[in-house]
Image (cartoon, rainbow, N blue to C red):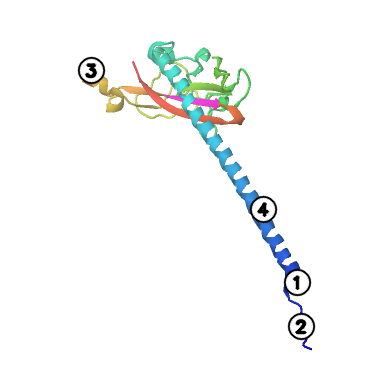
Amino acid sequence: MTKQSLPKASRERGVVLLFCLIVLVVLLSGGVAVVRSMNSSLFSAGNLAFKRDLVNRGELAASTVLTQFKSGALATVADTYNNMPARNYSAVQLVANDRGIPMVLLKTGATPTGKNVAGADFSPTSADIKDDAAGVTIRYVIDRLCSATGEPTITTTNTPPTSAGADVHCVSVPSSTDLIGGDARRAGKDLGNALALVYRLTVRVSGPRDTQVFLQSSFTNPLE
């Protein structure tokens, strides 16, 4: 009689099952990681979409301010010599943080207050631009880059405002450049070495999911 050995398959089934379980755990872990990564990507994309929308909505503040300077309460240079809180306008440069954002815009509350470079308080009182349905609030402030209120007495360009003094020093640029005075020259007017005051518009737009965007731009207005 010959001896017959039992097949090894019956003794290897437990090892195969162990490897299958390990592979299954690895696949499940990979699936969970992919799902989490997808959720993070969707969340980031959603935030970017919110921020882009807030940037677009910030143009409402720019449109409002330009209207004030074109045909509203700030239409003439003389109108800009003094503070106008009802238009969120400061005739003196406001104190800003290291990123150039005026501190008054970093305050919360209905009537935020911030310092200007002369050390005085400035509280904008104009109502915010709101879209309650979209949950968006736009707050803005305009400051003239000068050291004090009143008519500028400068005769040279780019005198930086530091603090209040006998003269009203302002940041300015020549208004006879193509960018600023081109239309006037084409109309036959000689601006010579006239200066243009520099104003700074800073906008804070707050939206859903605690999304917040700050926008800033500068523009000029020829001295009369």
Earlier-in-chain disc, 2 versus 1: 2
SS assignment at label 1: helix
Earlier-in-chain disc, 1 versus 3: 1
Give residue 206's mark: none
When the figure is inspected, residue 218 is found, relative to residue 1, above or below; the finding is above
Give residue 189's mark: 3
Instruction: Identify which residue, 19 or 152, lies in the foreground.
Output: 19
**Mark 1–mark 3 distance (CA, rounded to whole Å):** 103 Å
The amino acid type of the residue labelled 2 equals Gln
Residue sitting at x 37%, y 23%: 220
Earlier-in-chain disc, 4 versus 1: 1
Q: Position of residue 112 (x, y in %)?
A: 60, 21
When the figure is inspected, residue 35 is found, relative to residue 148, above or below; the finding is below
| Residue of label 1 | 10
The amino acid type of the residue labelled 1 equals Ser
| Residue of label 4 | 28
Decide whether residue 201 is among the magenta residues.
yes
Instruction: Identify which residue, 176 or 170, lies in the foreground.
Output: 176
**Mark 2–mark 1 distance (CA, rounded to whole Å):** 15 Å
| Residue of label 2 | 4
Instruction: Identify which residue, 8 or 58, lies in the foreground.
Output: 8
SS assignment at label 2: loop
User: Which region of the structure is painted magenta?
Assistant: 199-205
Q: Which secondary structure type mostly characterizes the magenta part of the structure? A: strand
Earlier-in-chain disc, 3 versus 2: 2
Decide whether residue 66 is among the magenta residues.
no
Of circles 2 and 4, which is in front? Answer: 2
